[in-house]
Image (cartoon, rainbow, N blue to C red):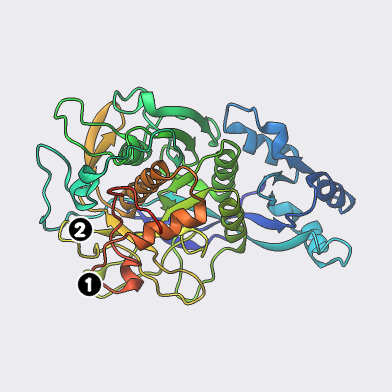
Amino acid sequence: MAAPTAIAVASLHAGRPMPKYTGRQLVLLNTAAKTSVLINQAKKASLRFANSLDFSKAKSGDFLHMALLQADGIVFDKLKVAIINEEANEPLKHLLASSSTAKNFLWQEPERYVYAFAKKKKQIIDFKDNSTASWAMQAIEVLQSKYSGKGINVAVLDTGIDTTHPDLKARIKKKKSFVKGQQVTDLNGHGTHCGGLIAGDKHATRHFRYGVAPQTNLYVGKVLNNEGSGTDASILAGIEWAMENKCRIVSMSLGAEASIGEAYSKVYESVAAEALKNNCLIIAAAGNESQRSRGYISPVGHPANCPSIIAVAALDQQLKVADFSCGGLNTDGGQVDIASPGVNIWSTWKNKAYRRESGTSMATPIVAGIAALLADQDPTITAAALWMKLTQQAKRLQWPASDIGAGLAIAPQKVTFTP
């Protein structure tokens, strides 16, 4: 595949510019059309498509790379989304413009690079870790909950996980890499930290609570490489895999910076809406690009800015909006839906270790864990009702809804009955 010809700068990562677009295109397809029909129509326009079903049993993330080398693009069968190589843009335009195919090839947008949201500086502590639990677990009142997330399938799409970590290995139900040349093993640490916040049990030596739902089933999808970056293609592949495995919740502590006035992705919105219909709730980080102490608030990033994805903001130990947490500035989607602890958060790390991290990346798996507790409370609950319950039970705070949505996510305390 040819290298991208035009790269927009999204933001800075470790002081370096981060590219925004890969050069490939995302194409939204008609969800009612059979994949075989779509592939045949593309073939008539001189576009050769691979089908994700042909790679469903692939154990390595190399399948995406190979499919895009051997064909002009790949169709994700369940999502009805295609990834198209840059050099195939001309026949793609024909498919989108032709009256005979436009009903099946609906929309195109550039494929983005996405990144793990990096940590930010620590803030003043009010809530404190103690011998019983981390400050985050105290804030969400999980110690008062009798639920554990038992039997609930939660997908963590991130940099992978430390599969040997004593706190996590028993919780890993299934794992798969969508990154070329890399195994699920997390050499970054970010994914292991997020996985621990969902399903980590008590600290091995300190025996204090830091994980929200310690009996969930973790489905670990490595969609970001060991440097913490990836593309829409790997993430969409991970979402499809999570849906195929009937995950009730998908946690994504990743994204790309959005600009003021930038619209949300129609492709991701279609995917997220379809996931909701299939009883799968996607939860994503709002982003870390703000510098509120300097008067700058950045809008909620991609893909959390989609209306059918829960966007999570971060709070500090005083339950104030974290300095870095993005806000709901764009009117066309892009609102914050809920908030949770995201500063100075203790969890698992690579190489069987533990450490503190900050970011909306940390707030997101905490909300995903609470969602798993709610699903444990009511196993028949739909994804849409789960979203509603998360926001209805949130603790209202003094900050604007544009910053924290419904408020602080709270763990379910007891079964409630509707008369």
Cα separation between marks 2 and 1: 14 Å
Judged left or right of residue 212, residue 91 is right
Q: In the picture provided, is 296 more to the left or to the right than 21?
A: left
* Residue 358 coordinates in the image, percent (x, y): 25, 51
**Amino acid under disc 2:** Asp
Counting the numbered discs, the total is 2
Nearer mark to the viewer, of 2 and 1: 1
Q: Is residue 172 above or below residue 383?
A: above
The structure residue drawn at horizontal position 66% and vertical position 32%, both measured from the top left corner, is 56
Which of the pair 3/258 is nearer the observer?
Answer: 258
| Residue assigned mark 2 | 316
Image location (x, y in percent) of residue 289: 34, 63
Residue 189 position within the rendered picture, expressed as x and y whole percent measured from the top left: 33, 36
- The mark found on residue 38 in the picture is none
Residue 303, percent from left and from top: 49, 58
Q: Is residue 183 visible?
A: no
- Which residue is disc 1 drawn over? 398
User: On the picture, is 110 further left or further right than 219?
Assistant: right
Assign the N terminus to one quadrant of the image: top right
The image quarter in which residue 276 lies: bottom right
Q: Is residue 266 above or below residue 161?
A: below
Within 10 Å of disc 1 (Cα), the crowding (few <14, some 14-19, many 20+) is few
Q: Secondary structure at mark 2?
A: loop
Q: Amino acid at mark 1?
A: Gln
CB contact under 8 Å: marks 2 and 1: no
The foreground one among 210 and 229 is: 210
Q: Residue at x 51, y 51 (%)?
A: 382
